[in-house]
Amino acid sequence: MDIKGKVVIVTGASSGIGEAAAREFGREGATVVLAARRVDKLQALAQEVNAMNTGAQTLVMQADLSKLEDIQSMIAQTLERFGRIDVLVNNAGFGRLDWLENLDPIKDIQAQMDVNIMGVIQTTRQVLPIMMKQRAGSIINMCSMAGLVGTPTYSIYAATKHAVHGFSEALRREVKPWGIDVSLIYPGGVVTEFTQHAGIKRKTNAKTPKFMLLTAEQVGAAVVRLVRHPRRMLVIPWLWNVTVLMNKLFPGLVDYTTIKRFTIPERAEELNIK
C-alpha cells in the first residue's frame, strides 16, 4: 500500500507506540486521525505532524475506547471529514500486573477487558463495512508477547491479548476476499509509559534484558512497515520467537522454570518459605 494520502486511524495515540506510529505515518504523508483520551497530548502531536511539510493532515479525536458511543463518533467524524478509512491501528490498551487476587474487579479486571478486547472489537466492527465497501484496507492489531506466552502477574493482560490474537486470526480469514489485510504485531518489552501505570511490584530482579528492549519508535516503524508489506504475525525482536517455540513444544519445562525461578521466590513469604 502506498501510504501517502491514505486515511489512518491510530488509537492510543497520545503516548508510546501509538504516538510513535502516528508520527511515522505523518512522515509518510498520510492523513492521521489521532484518537485517545488525553486531548492536550493529541493536539501537541497534531501540531508536530502538521509541521512536517509532507502533506500530512490530522484530526484529533478525544475518545474513550471502552465507550461504544465514542467509537461511533470517531468513525462518523472521520468519514465526514475525509470520506474514507484506509488503515486502522488498534493500539489503545493498558495493563495492570499483579497476582489475580490482588486485582480490583472493576478498575483492574473489567477495565482491561473493556479497553483491550471490546475496544479493539468494537472499533474494528465500525470500520469494517467501510473497508468492505472500498474493497481495500489494512487493520493492524497491537498484541504483545503476552498474547503468545502467559506469565505470572499477567493473567488478565495475557487473557486480553490472547483474545486479540484469536479475534484477529478469525477476522483475517473472514475479510481477505474484500482486499482487507489483518496483521498482528507482538512486541516484547518496550520503553513506554506502560510500566509506570501497570503497578509492577518485583521482589526478584526479573525484567526484560536491556538488549531485548525496544523503543516506541522501533515498534511504530514496524507498524508502518506492516501496512506497506502485510504479514499475519510479526514478533519483535525476533529472538522472542525462541521463547514462543519453547512454550509451544515444552510447556512443562516452561512451567517448571517459571514457577521455580519467579513465582516461588516472589511469593516465598506468603508460602512460608525461608
Image: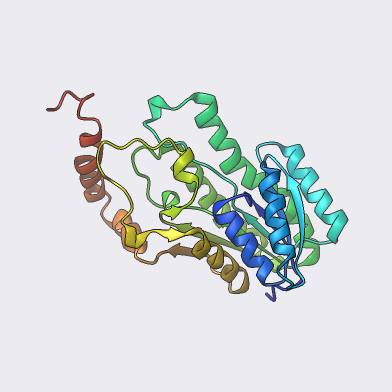
The residue under the point 60% across, 40% down is 115
| Residue 51 on image: x %, y % | 73, 66
- Check the image and tell me how it is coloured: rainbow
- The answer to whether 269 appears left or right of 155 in the picture is left
Q: Tell how many labels.
A: 0
| Residue 75 on image: x %, y % | 78, 50
| Residue 97 on image: x %, y % | 41, 37
Viewport quadrant of the N terminus: bottom right
* Foreground pick, 24 / 229: 24
Quadrant of residue 79 in the image? bottom right
Vertically, is 257 above or below 242? above
* Foreground pick, 86 / 199: 199
One can see residue 139 in this view: no
Viewport quadrant of the C terminus: top left
The residue under the point 30% across, 37% down is 202
| Residue 20 on image: x %, y % | 58, 60
Quadrant of residue 227 in the image? bottom right
Quadrant of residue 68 in the image? top right
